[in-house]
Amino acid sequence: MNSQPGYDLARITLVVLIIGVLVAGSLWTLLPFLGALTWGATIVVATWPLLLRIQRVAGGRRWLATAVMTGVMLAIFIVPFGLAIGMLLDAAVEGVELVQAFFAQGLAAPPEWIERMPWVGERVAAQWRELAGGGPEAVIETARPHFRWAAAWVLSITGGFGMVVVHFILTVIIAAILYSNGEMAARGVLLLAHRIGGEQGERAVRLAGQAVRGVALGVVVTALVQSLLAGLGLWVSGVPRAGLLLAVMFVLGVAQLGPLPVLVPAVIWLYWSGSAGWASALLVWTVLVGGLDNILRPVLIRRGVDLPLLLIIAGVIGGLIGFGVLGLFIGPVILAVTYTLLESWVRNDKAGGQGPPT
């Protein structure tokens, strides 16, 4: 009579151990693809309503809607990448010409706008004159200790960019597969959640989807507003190709880099061109626009997720610090699910009459 419970316990323990080993092995196998899988699933969850809308317009043809969404993803990456390559090539040609002129004529005197730069202008101009007086040899000797660091930095950036391209291709492939079979994947996740936590498990999964869509709304709208305001500042201050730079800033905003990589060089270029007034005005505008996302994004995310604003801000900032750009989605999702489950547990506890001891 006592052998049956022991046998059942041993069998259950063995089954749980085998399942745990299989799950751990599966996760280890998928580890190289985990980032792309997470990004692909996040993008699909965030843009699923848009896919369904395109499918209705396309007469119910899922393959056509999937092709459109996949093409948009590719264009978002390829177009800015092509523009950036063109700008880098132009800059490389100008850099070669500057190096040739430097060795032929030496380092020229510092431009007037250098001295007019706020805070650091006079110090930079004085150092520039000192290097110019020493000839090309002095400049090379000063820069020599930094050559190895610069070469290592260029190699690391090149290797990192190669990994970004690989992960992007994997993300697009995974997203296309999920677009084609999204309902099946959603049913599987809901069944697993129901198996683990019942109705509360399903509710947690649905809340996670809402959180992802809310974060996507906040990210895209914030990037759009920031890029429009930054582009307006560039156009008013007379920076050329403001429309093209606006598109680049929008992509940078979606990637959580913000408009500063474009605005700061624009400010420097204006000082270089002698427009110190416009450069100072654009510098102030850069500070205002650059900090706008810290206010606008949490407010927009809260419109899609019914959570306290403090939790959303903590999820966004903590997720970015802990997980990088992907943490922008992971942080609010984790806090949203945890908050909802705890709230439901406390509410059920009170409904069952199990209040705090008195």
Image: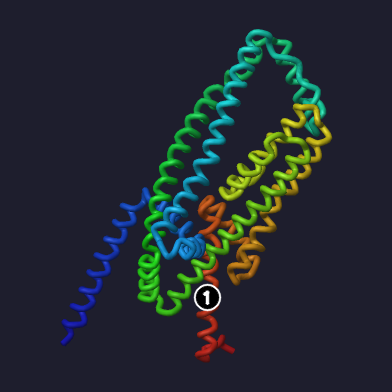
Q: Is residue 107 left or right of residue 155?
A: right
Residue under pointer 1: 342
Task: Inspect this view and state whether residue 210 appears.
Answer: yes
Position above or below: 10 against 262: below
Identity of the residue furthest to the front in this view: 59
The x, y position of residue 86, in whole percent, is 56, 31
Position above or below: 311 against 130: below
Colour scheme of the picture: rainbow
Q: Looking at the picture, tell me which residue is in the foreground, 122 or 41.
A: 41
The x, y position of residue 67, in whole percent, is 42, 53
Q: Looking at the picture, tell me which residue is in the foreground, 322 or 206.
A: 206
Position above or below: 293 against 159: below
Task: Inspect this view and state whether residue 45 appears.
Answer: no
Q: Residues within 10 Å of mark 1 (few under 14, many from 20)?
A: few
Q: Is residue 22 left or right of residue 120?
A: left
Image quarter hosting the N terminus: bottom left
Position above or below: 191 against 105: below
Query: Label 1 sits on what residue type?
Result: Leu
Image quarter hosting the C terminus: bottom right
The x, y position of residue 9, in whole percent, is 23, 77
Q: Is residue 18 left or right of residue 243?
A: left
Q: Looking at the picture, tell me which residue is in the foreground, 178 or 276.
A: 178
Q: What secondary structure is marked by label 1?
A: helix
Which residue lies at the image location 27% right of the left edge and 65% below the top edge? Answer: 19
Quadrant housing residue 91: top right
Which residue lies at the image location 63% right of the left edge and 51% below the top edge? Answer: 223
The x, y position of residue 293, in whole percent, is 67, 53
Quadrant housing residue 122: top right
Identity of the residue furthest to the bottom in this view: 353
Which residue lies at the image location 50% right of the left edge and 44% below the top edge? Answer: 77
Which residue lies at the image location 72% right of the left edge and 32% below the top edge? Answer: 268
